[in-house]
Image (tube, helix red, strand yellow):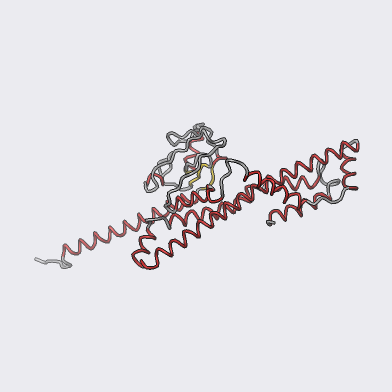
Amino acid sequence: MTFVTLTFTCTMARGRNNNRTSHGDGGGAIHSANMAINKEQEYKEGVKKLQNRATMTAELLTEGGEIETFLMEADPDNAEGFLLAQRNRLKAIAEGNAKQWDEIENFVQAVKDVRGDVQRQNQSSAAAAGGEGEGEAAAAGTDDPPDYERSIQEAIEKVRLGKESDPNHVPLEEHEMVMSLREKLGEKVKKRARNDDDDDLEIVNNVGSDDVHVLKCPITGMFFEDPVRNKVCGHTYDRKGLNQLFSTRKTKCPIPGCSNNTLSLAQVEVDDEMKLKVRRHKTREEAAKKKRDLDETMDDDEEGGGYTVLE
C-alpha cells in the first residue's frame, strides 16, 4: 500500500465518524475523497520533476554526444561498459516513473469509484429511513465501520485489470516517459499509434534538435528565458511571447502546420529541459568565443615575432 493510499484511507475513516456533524450528504468520507481527487496533480508533480531530471541527464549521455566522445577517447577500454550501465539505469528510472504515474491515476480513479459507492449507499439509507438526515444518522449508528482500505485496494485492482484488458493498453516499456527518454539517448524508437481524443491533432516538430532555432521562441524570435511547453501539442514558447500572443486575442499555436486551435495558459507547463538546453548553448558559445579570442591573440604574437622593431 502506498503512502498516499494509506493516508487517504485513515483520513476517510476519520471522516466517516464525523458524517453526522461535519459534512452532510456523505459526510467526512466523501469530503476526504474529494480532497484526494483534487490533489492528483500535486501527486504527479514529484514524478514530473524526477522524469525531467532523468531526461536532461539522458540528453547528456546521448549516443555520439560530447560525453561519449570524450570518454571513448580518454578511456576506450571502459567507456562503452560505463555508458551502457548509465543508460540502462536511466531507462529503469523512466520505467519506475511511468509505473508510479500509472499508480497515481489508478488510485485517483479508485477513489472516485469508492466515493460513488459511498454516495449511493447514503442515498439508499436516507431513502429507506424516510429522510436523508435520518438515514445518515441511522447508518452511522447501526452499520459497522466501513473498511475503506480494503475497498480502495479492491477498486485499484479493478481499475488496473480493466486497463490491462483494454486493446489499446500501452505496456510499461512503451510508456511515453520511457520512449521519450530513449529518444533523448539517441535510440530509434517507433511510437505506437494513439487511439484517443487527440487522434485528429497533428503534432508538428519545431526543427532538428541541433538547430539553434529550437532554442528561440517562435513568437519573439529571441532565446528562451522562461520557456513553457504545451502539454497538448508539445511545442515550446517563451512565457513573455505567449502573453504577447494572447494580448492579440489569438488562440492558435504559432507553429506552422500545428492544428492546436485552442491554445491557453492551462495547456502549458514550465519546460526545464529547454532551460538547460539554452544554458548549455550559451555556455558553449561563450567558451568558443574565448577560444577564438585567444587564438587571435596568439596569431598576432606569432606574426610580430614578439619583438618591437625600433628604427
Left/right placement of residue 30 relative to residue 205 reads right
Q: Quadrant of the C terminus?
A: bottom left
Figure check: 277 above or below 192: below
Where residue 87 appears, as percent x and y from the top left, is 46, 59
Figure check: 102 above or below 86: above
Where residue 197 appears, as percent x and y from the top left, is 57, 35
Residue at image coords 71%, 43%: 112
Of 220 and 207, the residue lying toward us: 207
Left/right placement of residue 51 relative to residue 189 reads right
Of 186 and 164, the residue lying toward us: 164
Figure check: 262 above or below 189: above
Extreme left residue here? 311
Q: Quadrant of the N terminus?
A: bottom right
Residue at image coords 36%, 66%: 76
Q: Quadrant of residue 279?
A: bottom left
Left/right placement of residue 54 relative to residue 132 reads left
Q: Quadrant of residue 77?
A: bottom left
Of 173 and 87, the residue lying toward us: 173
Where residue 186 appears, as percent x and y from the top left, is 42, 52
Q: How many marks?
A: 0
Where residue 277 appears, as percent x and y from the top left, is 43, 52
Of 126 and 288, the residue lying toward us: 126
